Image (tube, rainbow, N blue to C red):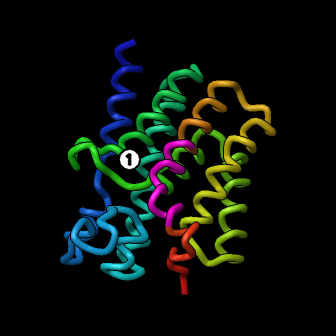
Amino acid sequence: MIERSFLVVLAYLAGSIPVGVLVGRAWGFDPRQVGSGNVGMTNVARAGGGGPAALTFLGDMLKGLVPVVLARMLVADEFTLVAVALFAFLGAVSSVFLGFRGGKGVAAALGVWLGVAPPAILIALAVFLVVLYWRRVGSLASLAAAVVLPIAVAALSYPRDYLGLAILVSGVVIYRHHGNIERLFRGQEPRIG
């Protein structure tokens, strides 16, 4: 029991690591002071370009993936795995190191789901890439992937706990994009390229 609680706390702390802020410091900027003020890859790209953005994406993805992989190695039960995945994701969107603020959770969710259910996230990732190529709007692609994820988890007959996790993670990602959704409806969301 202590091991499981420790894994959940560790997952939250790992998810809370403000990768975008750390990368920004290394490149001489603070993403919280630029553009949208978000600490994720897109805003880091605005402030520092492709290199810092790629590092931020990789770090954010790993902070979701590593705790899940560690839990898979140490504990056999699915409930603990789902709890670890959830808390790693929650750390990314509500970081203790950032006053319980954070990013939108897309990269961390990708990492979590690569560890929990790779086939389901690959379906959502394919949808992301198709929408991104078609519309050239990153937020729209993220929203489409978030909508598809629970459908993919259900279609692939994963356990109910996984479906609950997918619904919760997707719901939070969609909620965190509320400003983007408003801009999409107004036709003011920036395009890539």
Towards the viewer: 84 or 45: 45
Q: Amino acid at mark 1?
A: Val
Magenta stretch, residue numbers? 171-182
- Residue located at (72% from left, 69% from top): 130
Image spot of residue 98 (x, y percent): 22, 49
Question: For residue 168: magenta?
Answer: no
Q: Residues within 10 Å of mark 1 (few under 14, many from 20)?
A: many
Image spot of residue 21 (x, y percent): 25, 63
Image spot of residue 123 (x, y percent): 73, 54
- Residue located at (23% from left, 77% from top): 27
Where, by quadrant of the figure, is residue 95 drawn?
top left
Tell how many labels.
1
Question: For residue 181: magenta?
Answer: yes
- Judged from the image, the secondary structure of the residue bearing numbered disc 1 is helix
Q: Quadrant of the N terminus?
A: top left
Q: In the drawing, does residue 90 fall left or right of residue 171?
A: left
**Residue 184 vertical placement versus 71 (above, below):** below
- Residue located at (48% from left, 27% from top): 83
**Residue 59 vertical placement versus 150 (above, below):** below
**Residue 173 vertical placement versus 144 (above, below):** above
- Residue located at (67% from left, 76% from top): 135
Name the residue that disc number 1 marks.
93
Image spot of residue 52 (x, y percent): 35, 74
Tell me, yes or no, if residue 61 can be seen here.
no
